[in-house]
Image: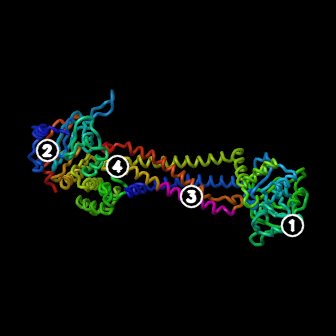
Amino acid sequence: MQLASQQITDFAEAPEFTTHHSPLTTHPTPAVECRGVTKEFGAGDTRVWALRGVDLEVRPGQMTLLVGPSGCGKTTLISIIAGLLNPTAGDVAVLGRDLGSLSNGALVRFRQAHIGFVFQQLNLLPALTAAENAAVPLIIGGRPRRQAVAAAAQVLEAVGLGDRLGALPAQLSGGQQQRVAIARALVHEPRLLVCDEPTAALDARSGQTVMELLRRVAVQPDRAVMVVTHDNRVFGFGDRIVHMSDGRVERVTAPGPARVAGREEP
Amino acid sequence: MSWVALRMLTGDRSKYLGLIFGVGFATLLMSQQVSIFAGIMRRTASQILDVRDADIWVMDDKVRYIDEVPGLPDTDLQRVRGVPGVAWAVRMYKGQIRARLPDGNFRTVILFGLDDDTLVGAPTEMLAGRLADLNQPDAAIVDKAGYEYMWPEEVEQVGSRGYQLGKVFEMNDHRAVLVGVCKASAPFTTLPVLYTRYSQAGGYVPRERDLMTFVLARPDAGQDVQEVCDRIHAQTGRMALTRPQFFWKTILYFLGSTGIPVNFGITIALGFIIGVAIAGQTFYLFTVENLKQFGSLKAMGLSNARLVGMILLQAVVVGALGYSLGIGVTAIFFASTGHLTPLAGLHLYAEVMIGSGAAVLLIVVLASLLSIRRVLVLEPAVVFRG
């Protein structure tokens, strides 16, 4: 895949986007590069264009928020970036790998190794404890169960659930379940973290806590974090906000003062 | 991921138990009904198997099964004896007649008239009396179930007093004296089985021109049984069958000419269908309800092959537990009813266990195929849909 470096530069220098907030934004290799990505569903009269030529760059060390109204293509775009959907046209590179060039098997392995997921509905396995749920990506990767659960326990400690390792999801509050989901997404130390509406099911206070947690434990110099959200109360936590509308990137902005406050919270 | 699959399976107790009971019920229905069916079919020809000292049965060449046998002229006995390769041949009578008891009651019985000199075809295990007592005047031996059927008032006292020999009854107005009780395989019709000497049977049977219904024979040592049968048929024109051939000829008659296999077949098929329906539907619903979880596992990098492995493992575990439950209950059923006369001789056959296992395997494979298909076509992106 050949991505036009000039276009990337233009993207970064767009008038509504500023790069002064984080020293990490100067990372030389983009975590995600999308060029002319389109996606259509259906055919003929029922054809729907979910994405119409999206260009986007996401850098390591940043939290990028994808925002916009329902049906604007956020979920489709994040699915394509995560290697869960194939674009109809366009190129997507994640961590320098052209996803289009990967076989199905290689794509599955790539996702397993490098991408962490926080799903809107969490999708925790109800029969597994918090530690076991958080250990699942390591087990998928071939780590022995005992080691995987031990590693997951450490991550759960980091997200503040060290005392609920043996609890089943049904025994946890919504916010605690969300933290288990975050631990599960981070346990295998992915370089791209994809979060789908992580605060949608939470009240304002819990939503703030989750976003603070994501900023504190997820954002790392070599890791990019992408968050799909339409919860404008958490816009301040992002380094960049990608506004989408009708399958296109409408504009990219830097957040206001709330963002700084959010980052400064423990 | 095996333990994840098992934890997912056992996490929902009600569905897990529902699956196991579904497969278990199907196993019970199939294995029990097939065993009873096989036992009943065996009963139709059990008297053939009980005659262990003869290898060849000679009879009218139009005979279809053991209970419908016309008489042969006495000269046929000598003709069979004259066939090269026949070591010995003896006559036998088998038929159904009425026995009248002193209190006026009567019972239809299966009567065997055994060769006076050799008693070929006699029961091999006596519970009371001696086989040699058949040589006494008017002597008859009855099987255990027949004793209970003819003298039900004695049943409760058998344990304390033993079988009461010397009982007198009549057949065709001829006196008969009970001299022994033996073990015999239960016949299809559950009628009492009486043994007496051939010469005596002539008095018990309403007069017919020909009394002898079978010639029982054994080939010379080293002679091929089938070849001797062919030779007998060629030289006498009578049907000569080996014991297994006559056994299967009788069973095939009942299979082809009665509604028994259809009725049992329907029950067995229902058991299978119920098993597929219950296990398939429950397993499918179980998978559908976990589609989001499967989708998230897929998104996190679990391959289709490993997902299929998880589902198959769940199916095999459910199948193994359900099968064990069903077979266990079937075994307990036969063990606890084996002493009941109507069910005597019916048991769980090893072949039925193997067959039921194969059927259960088929059930869980069919049940899991639908689930596997749903998981295989599942787009991992489903996890991002609300």
* Separation of marks 3 and 4 at Cα, in angstroms: 36 Å
Q: Which part of the image, by quadrant, shows the N terminus of chain B?
A: bottom left
Magenta-drawn stretch contains A142: no
Please identify the residue farthest to the left as the structure is shown.
A20
Q: Read off the residue under disc 3.
A: B327
Amino acid tagged 2: Pro
Tell me the mark number nearer the camera, choosing from 4 and 2: 4
Measuring from the top left, give residue A152's x and y in whole percent: 28, 60
Q: Nearer the viewer, mark 1 or mark 2?
A: 1
For disc 2, the marked residue is A255
Amino acid type at circle 4 is Ser
Q: Which residue is mark 4?
A: B303
Which residue sits at x=62%, y=46%? Answer: B266
Of all chains, the one bearing label 2 is: A
Q: Earlier in the sequence, mark 3 or mark 4?
A: 4
Residue A10 figure quarter: top left
